[in-house]
Amino acid sequence: NPMCHLGSLQIQSTVNRDGFVLVTVLQGLSNRFWSFTCCKLLSLCLCRVFRSTLTSIPQTQSLLNKAKLPLGLLLHPFKDLSQLPVVTSSTIVRCRSCRTYINPFVSFLDQRRWKCNLCYRVNDVPEEFMYNPVSRSYGEPHKRPEVQNATIEFIAPSEYMLRPPQPAVYLFVLDVSHNAVETGYLNMVCQSLLDNINALPGDSRTKIGFITFDSTIHFYNLQEGLSQPQMLIVSDIEDIFLPTPDSLLVNLSECKELVQDLLKSLPNLFEKTMETQSALGPALQAAFKLLSPTGGRMSVFQTQLPNLGVGALKSREDPNQRASAKDIQHLSPATDFYKKLALDCSGQQVAVDLFLLSAQYCDLASLGCISRYSAGSVYYYPSYHHAHNPAQVERFQKDLKRYLTRKIGFEAVMRIRCTKGLSIHTFHGNFFVRSTDLLSLPNVNPDAGFAVQMSIEENLLDMQVVSFQAALLYTSSKGERRIRVHTMCLPVVNSLSDIFAGADVQAITGLLASMAVDRSVSASLSDARDAMTNAAIDSLASYRQSVLTIQQPGLLAPACLRLFPLYILALLKQKAFRTGTSTRLDDRVFAMCQLKYQPLAYLMLMIHPALYRVDDLTDEGALNINERTIPQPRVQQLSVEKLSREGAFLMDAGMVIYLWVGRNCNPNFLTQVLGVPNYTAVPQNLYLLPELDTAESQRTRAFIGWLRDQRPFFPTLHVIRDESQLKANFMQNMIEDRTESALSYYEFLLHLQQQISK
Amino acid sequence: MVTLTMIARVEDGLPLAASMQEDEQSGRDLQQYQNQAKQLFRKLNAQSPSRCTLEAGDMAFHYLIEQGVCYLALCEASFPKKTVFAYLEDLQTEFHDQYGRRVPTVSRPYSFIEFDTYIQKTKKSYIDSRARRNLGSINTELHDVQRIMVANIEEVLQRGEALSALDTKASNLSSLSKKYRSDAKYLNTRSTYAKVAAGAVFFITLIVYVRFWWL
């Protein structure tokens, strides 16, 4: 019986079109070779979805404490995947006791029984599972797609639904005060909606609605059969009610013309408004009432501090404290109205996304709660203005397009399970934790990242591997109930040197950033900063004492952690945590929101931007994707030392890309790429590279396009000259340099070394 | 008011489409009714009656089976049956037209969830038309009451005659019984006298016999 042999392992690896490595394991068995090598390979594969801070799990909690590194997982469960196997099966095979889904890391004892890899219970293989529809063979349950793929999606049977699948429901809540109309955002939103109205994810049941507000709330009756949309104004904001029971949320396919009429006329309706007050709280309550029967997504656009009705906020920021070297105040919410409303929304499967487009202080610390607990997202466009800030306008437009057309899941829940002995104690991200490990996500979108921290409750003796499984149950926009399951398996080690050899420095940095945000809000910012520095000191000290046999002078770090001090320094100089440099409170709070929300890949760019020299791009080592040659310049260190007046440098900071042009830049670059005769002719606010027919221009634009394609949001491009205002932003990212309030990289390393040798 | 409408395949209970009307009162119970509906679907088979009403507290399930598909509606017990079944038949014709052919082939639950829009529109029209029909039926009921009242008066009149006849008979009965009573009394006294006289004669005979025989 071939199932009983601990036979040979076959691994095929292919590189598919997008450059991802696919590893297909053809026999899933438990032997030592399998557990150490294959786990790491598969975990590498999954590293885009599931990442652990330590790729070799310590055997005991005391060992973990000795290593002084945090143990946690970072996941990106709803990431857009180019290949996703989908299984429709009448029975979904799950462990009887712990309800884990069958996965590639279970062991088959014989043909009829399988052993769960999370709780070690032996289960029976159901009869239907013995037949493999893909290969049309019987008797080989280990060849079924559920056991061959670590990421898989099931079509859920009706036991997985509390109610019939909800339709896609989109409600837009728009600020139409004088301030809002001034910025001109309304035009952009309406235009974007008109352009993308047929691309909104959904089916024939999709519903849409609009609410606008200033000091009163305006509803729009879009009933089929009306000749034009009717506006209904409710001015009783103390006790908000819905003016008509239906036709405020209408079926999109049936009332499309009315919706389009409304979108065309909306900007003009409020052109002359003089209202300066904003009743955001009552508007949110009205929107919640409208959405609570079905659930759905609420998109709120706000351009000023809400100052009327329930949930009104005061301006708490003290501009003189922006550059404070001590603690920063007002990082926690001023009122719990928004959190309470978010929890109510979460209970009714409504998610709230907030778009903040203001130039003044808007107390994002309080407003952000509405998205944080309802699994929504926060978008921030400071000083948005249609004429004065065209770069923001372009970014808003591209972000809106992505926001409206990206994949979306409704009424979702996620559960993360791990092998007996490990337990999860803290969760990071935008969601509400419903019971010990069930995350309630009214909406799930492909741009959200989550993190969890774990501890080792029982010693993992006699175990060679541990497994983790994240299961996301959601309703697709077409009314299908689906379960997306990701499973990861990691080896267990019992020596400190192995733990250090398997540390994932980027995941550790990401998890530390989330933990530091929590610490700054609950304790203080300086506590958080100290904690981050101590994380570096403690772990490197532990390495020095416990692992190194020969004590040498100097600062020593294991290969995996050699960039750890650099990333910690980058975090300390990040907008969220920096002190001594003037930072607006809203900018700081938004940076904190991003640190907790962004998936790790984009987060690392935010923390440690990538610097390239672009005035001498060559085709050497270039990638060839879709018949375009994409040059691959080397990443430079973030230090002014590496900049040169004779060159042009590109800095990719995640949400924004800076192109700094040196004063004595190569005139070839200026003419061929920027299209200007000399340095003084470079325009001040250039945010778009001209499309010239030269080879250099094509290379540069291909490179920038390639950088932009790799992420779902659209980074703005700024071309900076020496005198530009944005030069300060560019220079702030030079984290290896010393500033008046922070150490240089070299000094930081010295500081660490001093602390370690104490 | 129809709170819940569900359409499922009879042979395996697979739900095909559904529509729920949530309001503040029904929220919690709706979960329980939904579970009952799902259990009901599983119990149905080819032998089940094609139309049936099941009572559940103050709500009632009405279902209709046609062509292997079951159409179920949950509404208040007081809701008129005729309207519900007319509504279910409307759904049945439309559903069969649109999706009838594909029903045996699907395996995913709620494959035809898009039918929800039609269900909601039909529901609204039946409730609306029910309101209109209600007015009409109130009218007819009023007429009925009028006729019944008229009829009753006539009956009452007829009953009045009967009543007076009854009255005379009753009074007759009372006088006759009085007479019977006095007669009975008279007879009683006469019989008592007769008894006493017989006793006296026997006693005298006895004394005469004793006087003349023993002396």
Image (cartoon, grey):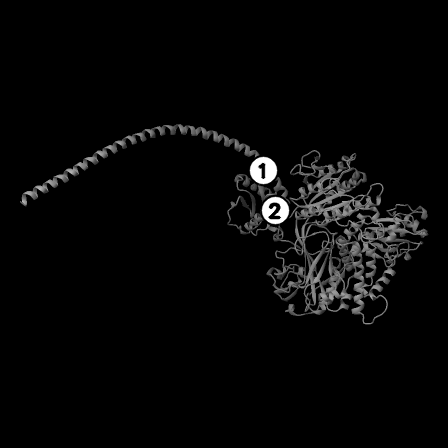
Question: For the N terminus of chain A, which image quadrant?
Answer: bottom right
Q: What element carries label 1?
A: helix
Q: Name the residue under label 1.
A: B127
Q: Percent x, y for residue A365?
A: 76, 48
Snapshot quadrant of residue A41: bottom right
Q: Which chain carries label 2?
A: B
Is residue B181 visible in this depiction of the protein? yes
Residue placed most toward the observer, B198 or A640: B198
Residue type, mark 1 in image = Ile
Residue B68 is left or right of residue A176, and the answer is left
Point out the frontmost of discs 2 and 1. Answer: 1
Q: Mark 2 points at which residue?
A: B17
Is A122 placed above or below B32 here? below
Q: Percent x, y for residue A431?
A: 70, 51
Q: Which chain carries label 1?
A: B
Q: Is mark 2 on a helix, strand or loop?
A: strand
Q: Which residue lies furthest to the front in this view?
A: B215
Alpha-carbon span between mark 2 and mark 1: 20 Å
Q: Which of marks 2 and 1 is nearer the N terminus?
A: 2
Residue placed most toward the observer, A2 or A64: A64
Q: Which residue is painted at 77% across and 62% down in the image?
A: A504
Residue A661 is left or right of residue B14, and the answer is right
